[in-house]
Amino acid sequence: MKIICGLILTLTVTSSTSQKTCQIKPDPQLGGSRVDCQNLNLTSVPGDLPPNTVSLDLSGNNITVLRDQAFVRLPRLMYLNIVNSQVSRLEANAFKGLSLLLSLRLNNNNLQLDNHTYPEDVFSPLQSLTELNIGNNDCRLRGTTPDWIFKWLINLETLTIDTFEYDIFGSGFGYLQKLVTLNIGTGFEDDCIHSAIGVIQNHTFSVFENISVQVLDVTGSKLLAIHAGAFLPLYFYISKIVLENVITLPTAMALRAFYGLNGKNVSKVLMRNSNKYVSLNRNLQSQLITKETVIYLTHICIEHLDLSYNNIIYLDENLILVLSRCIKYLDLSNNNILGDQSTFLMMSLCKHLLFLDASDQHKFIKRRYDLGQGSLKSQIKVTDNGLYHLYRHRISPENCSVSKLESFEAGIRFPPNLRICIIGGITDSFGEFFITGITGSSHLAKFDLSYNGARGFVKQINGLSFLNEVDLSGNEGRGMTKDFLLSFPNMTSLALNNMGFDKETLRRGGSVLEGLKTMHALRYLDIVGNDIRYMDMGSIRTLISLNVSRNNLVSVPFEHNDLPDLHILDLSVNSITYFDDDTMDMLESLGQKNKLVLRLKGNPLSCSCQSLLFVRWIFSSSVTFDSNGNYSCVTEYGALTTTHTVYNEFNYHWTSCQGRFWLPVSITLMCLIALLLVSAMLVSRNWTRIAHHILVLMGRGIQRVTRQNFNKDAYVAHSDEELQFVMQDLRIGLEDLHGLKLILPDRDFLPGQFVADHVVESINKSWKTVLVVSDDFLDDPWSYFIIKSTAYYISNLNPNRVILLMVGNVNRGRLPELLLNVTDEEDIIQLDDFPDPHSDVWVHVRDRILSQAV
């Protein structure tokens, strides 16, 4: 009894667990339940799923074996996914009861293509199945596909299956009468090749000769070769062939294989990113699309051809002639095509062409084109009516339905139905932009001429008035005029990235800005990587997206209400540190109105005290920021941090910044109060002196004396040893030659009177006192008396009265402190020797004597 109760309890727990972990949702379209049991580590199919389950996903589990009757309780099941669940074997009745199943995906498991893994009748209940994917399972290079397991799948439309190295589809595949898509491009991994087929032979697909296979997908296989008649069994129904990422297949060989489809309309041929390993191994022939190769395509009508990333280095011009009859979509981008880029101008022959991409060829070009010597312009002739013509002889391939052309107009003629033309990077030396008119462009919506080395965008181009999107990036933009931009009146998107504009290009009144103002429909503008510092985008009011990243801007390049419809603003990698309050208010208004997206990554943002409000605004704004507003920034002390960190510690930073401001303010105020108190005390104690100085400053005090108050210009004192120097050189130099009035003791002192009286009287009568200082003078007993008397008569009314003439190498340490206190440094004149009367030194002495007291 206990055993029975325990068993019942276990079953109950198991049932409730599966119901809980598998997500069950209603499917209104299919009228049942959709069950999701992904990644639950299941080892078997749950037995308690709803019987009305119409879609079941068991991917990402560990179901190594699909047991008999695993789905018998799900009779309404229509979609079954068991992807990446370690399945390695199917029991014979694993799919019993699934008569309504439409899609079965068993890819990315461990199912080997053999009779042991797939019993012959394992798919017998699946007669309604339209899609089967058993690819990415078998890593073996050799084996035999059990083709008879497919005889029950009479309604199958899409089959994805692994292949072996020399695989040939057996007769069992002949029962797939409704097969539309055959996918054998299941790819490969580092240690496993699922799509191991190495050669598609002429009879590889023979079994499908009477089956309506429309799509053949060999993407990512290790295909090495395709025989010329390999596609012939698919002739009547095939419309799309996919050979993308077949890196081991030579492009020329792949194109020759289309010979079996002569006279057939093929809607799509996709060969993107093929031929990689072949070209790396320097198989030159595989990189040439020659005339002989083109002949195989002569009678095939291809609407969509993708040969991008194929390392093609030569493209025969006749390919364009062959394709011109039907081609609508042509992608030749990212190849190595050398030589004459004017081949691309032949596209005007393709009357049905809607899309052309021939971009990114110039990075492989070895030859330099100089204007007039191989440039595009040199191949074009200006006719009398001003149109540009390119006269070239084109040889039509044999049996080609396109007639032989002797000449055609190029450079200005586009295919009449072309919508998108991408020819950026087809050359690196386009040179002077010479085109002034384009015809056949009435349907052209997008034109990409970027990175072609073009310059001189000066003249207006006729015929581009319908263009919506233009990319001129990577060319030389200096000198671009308003007339050139007038060529695009209906422009909605314009890219002018990396054009070498200087920092003043978009200032108000500039030719480029004036031209942009005329584009009244412009919505998207990219001006990236131009080192522009100043912009005035306010006049382009129609913009909804403005990308000015990688410039040198320090703020937003417009003002309030200038761009009312702006939704995206990219300011990344500029020189912005923070936004002021007005800028934040403007952007906040756009965020509330338009849900503005603002990109600021890569700017040297500041998280200092000055920008704290900016940091807080980032995380509280209605604007959507890139990186969720978390940018690197620098603090007040030069430390690197992030805006998110500063925002989380906002109160700490705010308090710190406020304290840093108020502390010095408080100290300053205290010092001012203390200074005022001390000043008040000093004023009260020295009021008379202060009043005196104020009155003097106001001109109401005593007045200083001037030269006119004295009879003589200078009294000259000297020792006996300098008598001859004074009476001759000094007297002649100052009196005779410069007109000064001097008192010379040996000439002007009267005999019999006291010398002391003469000295005092002479000092009083003279404007300045000149002391001829030598060691003898300092030894003279009268020198100290003269010095003291001179100092005595110096006052505020007549300062700077003493001039010292230092004769010879005088010991300055002997000069009295009293004398130095009353003598300015500029009044101490060194005389290295006794100068003659005509020496320039006397001019200097005269100027010092006559100078006004300071």
Image (cartoon, rainbow, N blue to C red):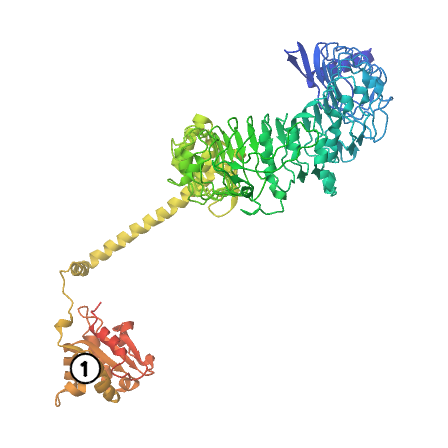
Mark yes or no: residue 45 visible.
Answer: yes
Residue tagged 1: 736
For label 1, the SS is helix
Residue that appears at 72% across and 36% down:
275
User: In the rendered image, which quarter is residue 696 located in?
Assistant: bottom left
**Image quadrant for the N terminus?**
top right
Residue 831: horizontal and vertical position, in percent? 30, 80
Q: Is residue 46 left or right of residue 689?
A: right
Q: Nearer the viewer, residue 213 or 70?
A: 213
Task: Examine the rendered structure and indicate whether residue 56 appears above or below residue 521.
Answer: above
Query: Please, what is the three-letter code of the amino acid marked with disc 1?
Result: Asp
Mark yes or no: residue 185 visible.
Answer: no
Q: Is residue 618 left or right of residue 365?
A: left
Q: Nearer the viewer, residue 462 or 397?
A: 397
Q: Nearer the viewer, residue 280 or 825?
A: 280
User: In the rendered image, which quarter is residue 817 located in?
Assistant: bottom left
Residue 184: horizontal and vertical position, in percent? 76, 26
Residue 319: horizontal and vertical position, in percent? 66, 33
User: In the rendered image, which quarter is residue 539 located in?
Assistant: top left
**Image quadrant for the C terminus?**
bottom left
Task: Examine the rendered structure and indicate whether residue 288 appears above or below residue 687.
Answer: above
Q: Nearer the viewer, residue 811 or 523?
A: 523
Residue 290: horizontal and vertical position, in percent? 70, 37
Are there few (<14), some (14-19), or many (20+) residues within 10 Å of tag 1?
few
Q: Residue furthest bottom?
A: 752
Q: Residue furthest right?
A: 116
